[in-house]
Image (tube, helix red, strand yellow):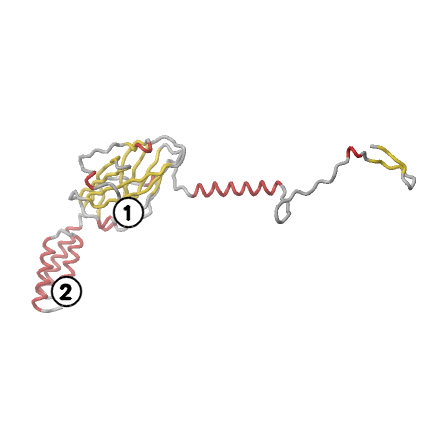
Amino acid sequence: MGYELGPDGFIRRTTPASTYTPPLRPVPTGGSGRQFPPGVLIFVVIVIIAIVVIVGLNSSKTSSNGGTYVPPAVSSVTVPPNADSADLSPTGYIQALSARVDNLEFFQAGYVAPGKAERVYNSAFQADESATGLVVYWELNLSHPTRGGRQAFIIYVCLYGPDGTLKSQTQVPSYVEPAWQSSFHFAHWPEAMSAWEPGSYRVSLFVDGIKVAGSVFTITPDPQRGRRAEGLVAEAHRLYEQRQYKEAVEACDGAIKSDPGNSEAIQLRAQILRTIQLLGVE
């Protein structure tokens, strides 16, 4: 830094060549040529991270201890019917998940299941008129260690009717989240409670071709069903004697609907239909 006398007679300060710094060239920022302050860029990054976290949380249907819901499945399964029997004991363990089966339970509810704390578990359900709109759920409870990421698996569900034959065979997908040490997995059969035939039903669950759980529940008949059927059969006899054939058939139909095994209603209905055919009446 120095001084010199200017042509106007005033002393002015000079800058040595060695300390001269050329002006900075603007850094290209793309087609628009605009630069964004650092604060704006930080805000955008925070918003993107928040969106990713929210989407990740919403994509997982979980509860505090890891519950997953699977809707009623209709797809076929690969477990052959002869792979199961009442004498085949479940292992109680899922090898792929390193999971112990705590229990297999059942409950009834509407098509939207209540929370786990509100569920009433039972092994017997009554198929009466109050069960209209209710379905039967199964629930598999597991204990297992944490893992490095979400692990998906498929549960194969076999349902056997009161006569021992295979009533339905379905597969349902489920999963275990990394931090879960216990989990429950549940779904329901599509038939309404009122449509189930009374009797004992056996359920077997398979994972990777191995029977891991099994249990039994019972559908008990409506205690009023027999009395309603008897009253309708008596009404059908009265209408038949009065030659009100159409009304008599309808009474028999009501009795059979209330009690499908009512042989008197079935035989009387057939007799009325033969009479209608012989007389040529409608």
Other-residue count near label 2 (Cα within 10 Å), few / some / many at <14 / 14–19 / ≥20? some
Which residue appears at 7% of the width and 67% of the height?
278
Which residue appears at 77% of the width and 33% of the height?
19
Image position, residue 111 (x, y; %)? 31, 48
Image position, residue 188 (x, y; %)? 28, 45
Q: How many marks?
A: 2
In this rendered view, identify the residue nearer to me: 90 or 192. 90
278 displayed left or right of 208? left
As measured in the structure, the alpha-carbon distance from the residue carrying label 2 to the one carrying label 1 is 42 Å
Which residue appears at 26% of the width and 51% of the height?
132
Q: Residue furthest front?
A: 17
Tell me which corner region of the image, top left, top right, bottom left or bottom right, holds residue 147: top left
- Which of the two discs, 2 and 1, sits closer to the camera? 1
Other-residue count near label 1 (Cα within 10 Å), few / some / many at <14 / 14–19 / ≥20? few
Which quarter of the rendered picture does the C terminus lie within?
Answer: bottom left
Q: Given the image, on which type of amino acid does mark 1 rest?
A: Ser
Tell me which corner region of the image, top left, top right, bottom left or bottom right, holds residue 10: top right
Sequence-first disc among 2 and 1: 1
Which quarter of the rendered picture does the N terminus lie within?
Answer: top right
In this rendered view, identify the residue nearer to me: 149 or 72. 149
Label 2 sits on a secondary structure element that is helix
271 is higher (above) or lower (below) than 38? below
Image position, residue 257 (x, y; %)? 18, 54
107 displayed left or right of 36? left
257 is higher (above) or lower (below) than 13? below
Label 1 sits on a secondary structure element that is loop
Q: Given the image, on which type of amino acid does mark 2 rest?
A: Lys
Which residue appears at 33% of the width and 47% of the height?
112
Residue 75 has which mark? 1
In this rendered view, identify the residue nearer to me: 95 or 142. 95
Residue of label 2: 246
Image position, residue 139 (x, y; %)? 29, 39
